[in-house]
Image (spheres, helix red, strand yellow):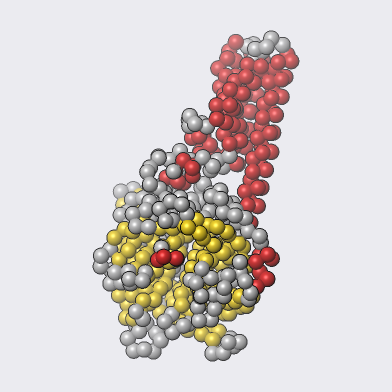
């Protein structure tokens, strides 16, 4: 199953070109001793030039390290074909056909191969970018008809302009929106604020209800209490390297005097992996039985995990008891949500080096979702890896994810997922249908619903029949999205 992930990550033209250039340079240099001094210098120089051109161009199509690793894969036809072509070109240049015309033909063949592969890799890159913008990925999700085709029945208005820099959002038991983030763009000045509107058309007010929370990347409510996923970022020098302390935690906050602010703080989970750059303890969700699910990022871009809870989705009781690893193999799962049938779903950020694009997973207990093995073209083959439910491709970054249950939004816009495409600047709608294996779902359609700058998190409000979109970074806004007419 991992092989299906790996074979598409590097362009076949890159593998062909790299094999061609390597074989050509090897044979030319190996047999150049048979030539005179002047001719030997020309042949060696030409061979090195072709090799450098092949490596550079192939590396632009995909990570160069992964392209080189692919040369040792026996099941890649383009590698064998490229190597044989390179050997034939080298024999022509070395005078194997016995004439100056053969040498010219050899160099012309080299130029032709480099040019042909470069043009096709450029074409594939452009095609992949267009597919990423339209919402079609290598996992077969259908192309989006674009916001104009879907947006006829969609209205969006600015609901609130925020002072804090927002990371996450949730709807409280009082019906208000709550936002977790930081003040002054400083991680250790983490806060949670309640967003109120006295009248539907009036200005929104931002009231701090909790503070002194470092990197609050996930908030959720359960039995009236506020749960915050937070992570410190502290490192010590140990045995010649920097080691991050286990500062990740889930904190339960209680409003002891019913004044709308939270005075009592208690860590129900602690000693989770600390923050590694932009990876941290991120999302919190509760199932119908009241069990808590927490996502924990991995330390490195594509290296094996070390800490017991690193790169996992955890499950526990709200008091932190009965803690267990629910699923493994995630890199930076930013959002958790429950969908049809009580199934768990998450978004996960891909490795920066490979940059195949972020994904959405359907997650079940005991699943391994592939990290770090799916981030390597020649990673080890392991059994039971769960493929993504949705992968738009084009390096797209997916953050917030929410399910709109039947009846929570107008007909046609409910019973589907909404996912925030951060750098793509839009919100997608994912319509699922039952799959063929093991009761897992598959994406029947993916639509680009609306355009928003830097969308980070999403909340469905069934009472208001509305979708709220939180925009981060310098945008710092919440938008209210309402619907008219049929969505399908």
Residue at 56% over, 67% down:
455
Question: Residue 467, relative to residue 235: is it above or below?
Answer: below
How far from the left and from the top, in percent, is residue 62? 56, 42
Q: Quadrant of residue 476?
A: bottom right
Q: In this view, does 67 lie to the left or right of 284?
A: right
Question: Residue 266, relative to residue 200: is it above or below?
Answer: above
Q: In this view, does 486 lie to the left or right of 71?
A: right
Q: In which quarter of the image is residue 86?
A: top right
How far from the left and from the top, in percent, is residue 142? 59, 54
Residue at 48% over, 50% down:
351
Nearer to me, 123 or 280 = 123
Q: Quadrant of residue 221?
A: bottom left
Question: Residue 377, relative to residue 41: is it above or below?
Answer: below
How far from the left and from the top, in percent, is residue 199? 56, 89
How far from the left and from the top, in percent, is residue 389? 48, 55
Q: Which quarter of the figure is the C terminus placed in? A: bottom right
């Amino acid at each position: 199953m991992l092989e299906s992930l790996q074979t598409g990550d590097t362009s076949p033209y890159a593998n062909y070109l790299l094999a061609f250039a390597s074989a050509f340079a090897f044979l030319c240099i190996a047999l150049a001793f048979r030539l005179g001094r002047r001719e030997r210098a020309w042949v060696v120089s030409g061979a090195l030039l072709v090799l450098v051109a092949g490596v550079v161009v192939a590396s632009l199509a995909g990570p160069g390290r992964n392209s080189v690793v692919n040369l040792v894969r026996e099941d890649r036809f383009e590698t064998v074909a490229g190597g044989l072509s390179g050997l034939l070109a080298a024999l022509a240049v070395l005078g194997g056909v016995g004439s100056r015309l053969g040498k010219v033909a050899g160099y012309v063949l080299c130029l032709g191969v480099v040019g042909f592969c470069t043009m096709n890799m450029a074409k594939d890159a452009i095609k992949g970018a267009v597919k990423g913008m339209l919402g079609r990925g290598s996992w077969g999700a259908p192309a989006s008809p674009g916001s104009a085709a879907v947006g006829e029945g969609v209205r969006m208005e600015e609901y609130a302009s925020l002072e804090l820099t927002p990371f996450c959002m949730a709807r409280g038991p009082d019906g208000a929106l709550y936002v977790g983030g930081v003040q002054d763009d400083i991680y250790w000045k983490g806060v949670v604020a309640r967003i109120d509107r006295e009248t539907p058309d009036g200005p929104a007010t931002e009231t701090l209800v909790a503070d002194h929370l470092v990197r609050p990347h996930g908030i959720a409510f359960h039995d009236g209490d506020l749960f915050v996923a937070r992570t410190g970022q502290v490192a010590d020098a140990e045995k010649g390297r920097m080691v991050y302390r286990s500062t990740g935690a889930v904190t339960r906050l209680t409003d002891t005097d019913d004044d709308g602010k939270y005075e009592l703080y208690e860590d129900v989970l602690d000693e989770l992996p600390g923050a590694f750059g932009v990876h941290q303890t991120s999302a919190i969700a509760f199932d119908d039985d009241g069990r808590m699910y927490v996502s924990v990022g991995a330390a490195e871009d594509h290296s094996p995990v070390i800490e017991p809870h690193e790169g996992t989705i955890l499950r526990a009781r709200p008091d932190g008891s009965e803690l267990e690893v629910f699923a493994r193999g995630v890199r930076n799962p930013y959002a958790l949500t429950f969908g049809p049938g009580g199934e768990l779903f998450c978004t996960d950020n891909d490795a920066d080096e490979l940059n195949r694009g972020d994904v959405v997973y359907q997650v079940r207990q005991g699943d391994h979702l592939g990290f770090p093995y799916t981030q390597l073209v020649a990673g080890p083959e392991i059994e039971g890896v769960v493929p993504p439910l949705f992968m738009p491709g084009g390096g797209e970054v997916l953050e917030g994810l929410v399910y709109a249950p039947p009846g929570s939004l107008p007909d046609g816009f409910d019973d589907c997922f909404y996912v925030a495409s951060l750098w793509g600047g839009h919100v997608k709608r994912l319509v699922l249908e039952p799959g063929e294996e093991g009761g897992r779902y598959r994406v029947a359609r993916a639509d680009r619903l609306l355009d928003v700058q830097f969308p980070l998190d999403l909340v469905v409000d069934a009472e208001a029949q509305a979708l709220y979109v939180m925009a981060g970074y310098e945008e710092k806004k919440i938008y209210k999205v309402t619907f008219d007419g049929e969505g399908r």
